[in-house]
Image (cartoon, rainbow, N blue to C red):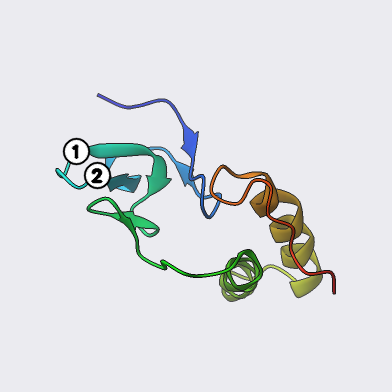
Amino acid sequence: MKPSINICQSCGMPMHHLIDFGTNKDSTVNTDYCRFCFVKGKFVDHGITLDQKIEQNIAFEEKRGMRREDATILAHSKLPNLRRWKGLKPVEE
């Protein structure tokens, strides 16, 4: 069974397959967050700020070959709108 495509509500990663999803405390699938952000009912990066998460995403996309300018635009436009960060304003650069 293949679930619908979801977007991680912490980092924005598309989640296409069951292996992509995080897990709840009872090890069931969590459809809101990916396996890199949410494990056994907890955020892997608990305490991280929106600005730190944006920087993490920019660095990750740069490693994948995206230009820093494009990665910055993408992270600043996507992350603040995700459920985990909604309502939190990143510090302006």
Q: Is residue 19 visible?
A: yes
Query: Mark 1: which amino acid?
Result: Thr
Q: Is residue 17 visible?
A: no
Give the left or right position of residue 52, taking residue 1 as reference.
Answer: right
- Residue 61, compared with residue 85, is above or below; it is below
Q: Position of residue 65 (x, y in %)?
A: 64, 71
Q: Which mark is residue 14?
A: none
Give the left or right position of residue 86, taking residue 93 as reference.
Answer: left
Residue at screen point 41% across, 37% down: 16
Give the left or right position of residue 87, taking residue 12 as reference.
Answer: right
Please, what secondary structure does the residue beneath circle 2 have?
loop
Viewer-side residue, 9 vs 70:
9
In the rendered image, which quarter is residue 56 located in?
bottom right
Are the residues at dot 2 and dot 1 in contact (C-beta closer than 8 Å)? Answer: yes
Query: Mark 2: which amino acid?
Result: Asn
Residue at screen point 78% across, 69% down: 91
Residue at screen point 51% across, 45% down: 9
Please, what secondary structure does the residue beneath circle 1 have?
loop
Q: Position of residue 38 (x, y in %)?
A: 34, 54
- Quadrant where the C terminus is found in the figure: bottom right
- Quadrant where the N terminus is found in the figure: top left
Give the left or right position of residue 22, taking residue 13 as reference.
Answer: left
Q: Residue furthest left?
A: 26
Q: Which mark is residue 24?
A: 2
Distance between the alpha carbons at the discs numbered 2 and 1: 5 Å
